[in-house]
Amino acid sequence: ILNVEQSPQSLHVQEGDSTNFTCSFPSSNFYALHWYRWETAKSPEALFVMTLNGDEKKKGRISATLNTKEGYSYLYIKGSQPEDSATYLCAFSRSGNQFYFGTGTSLTVIP
Amino acid sequence: EAQVTQNPRYLITVTGKKLTVTCSQNMNHEYMSWYRQDPGLGLRQIYYSMNVEVTDKGDVPEGYKVSRKEKRNFPLILESPSPNQTSLYFCASMPGTGNYGYTFGSGTRLTVV
């Protein structure tokens, strides 16, 4: 069984704060790392697909970086808004076929 | 609208009674997969399919079967459900195994009593 860890498990921030969280994965045989946003009572939605060491991706106020050599990815949210409240999942793959998800970081943005 | 459709959304059944959860996608995606979500655990992959008639086991395949007779459909079959299969199930698809993310279905909450 392959271990993908996300930290912190949960996070409460004030509206307007910037925040970041971590996804750690095995540093060998890397194929891809995905980030998803999962709102309560909905399905996970893809944020980023990252495949190359040093990748940086951005979508609005959310961005992500990737370090495959040391086995981690960071997700950053700049100027958090209440609508950013969700669980953020990462998923690691060695092959593009099998994906291993972390347990997620639950973000609550307090107005 | 591009989507993955799962049915039913909710299901309560009894131990041993065969059931099928359907999954269909309208995006012509080659790759489809089933996951289960349990409290305190990440999404765990049950089975995946690279294309029609090509399926393979994920991390937790015991007690499940799948088939991929057509590109759009990927049903999950529980031949003899047991209480430890009570879970939230997601079907997901993506165009291939390259630089793509999943599109997830709405989920099926299954309770086996």
Image (cartoon, coloured by chain):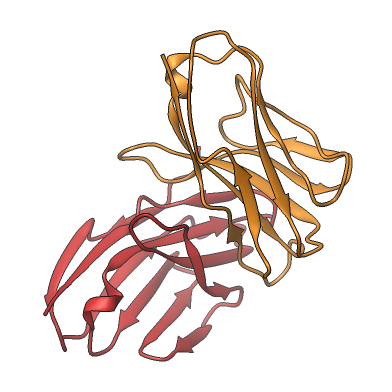
Relative to B24, residue B112 above or below? above
Q: Nearer the viewer, residue A29 or A22?
A: A22
Relative to A2, residue A83 above or below? below
Residue at 53%, 57% (x, y): give it. Answer: A92
The chain letter of the red chain reads A
Q: Position of residue A110 (x, y in %)?
A: 11, 75
Tell me: B27 left or right of A85: right
Residue at 61%, 67% (x, y): give it. Answer: B101
Residue at 57%, 38% (x, y): give it. Answer: B8
Q: Position of residue A4 (x, y in %)?
A: 42, 52
Residue at 46%, 88% (x, y): give it. Answer: A58
Q: Position of residue A10 (x, y in %)?
A: 20, 59
The chain letter of the orange chain reads B
Please identify the quarter of the rendering in which residue A51 is found: bottom right
Q: Position of residue B88 (x, y in %)?
A: 45, 38
The answer to whether residue B28 of the structure is visible from this angle is yes
Which quadrant of the figure contains the C terminus of chain A? bottom left
Q: Nearer the viewer, residue B3 or B90?
A: B3
Please identify the quarter of the rendering in which residue B53 is found: top right
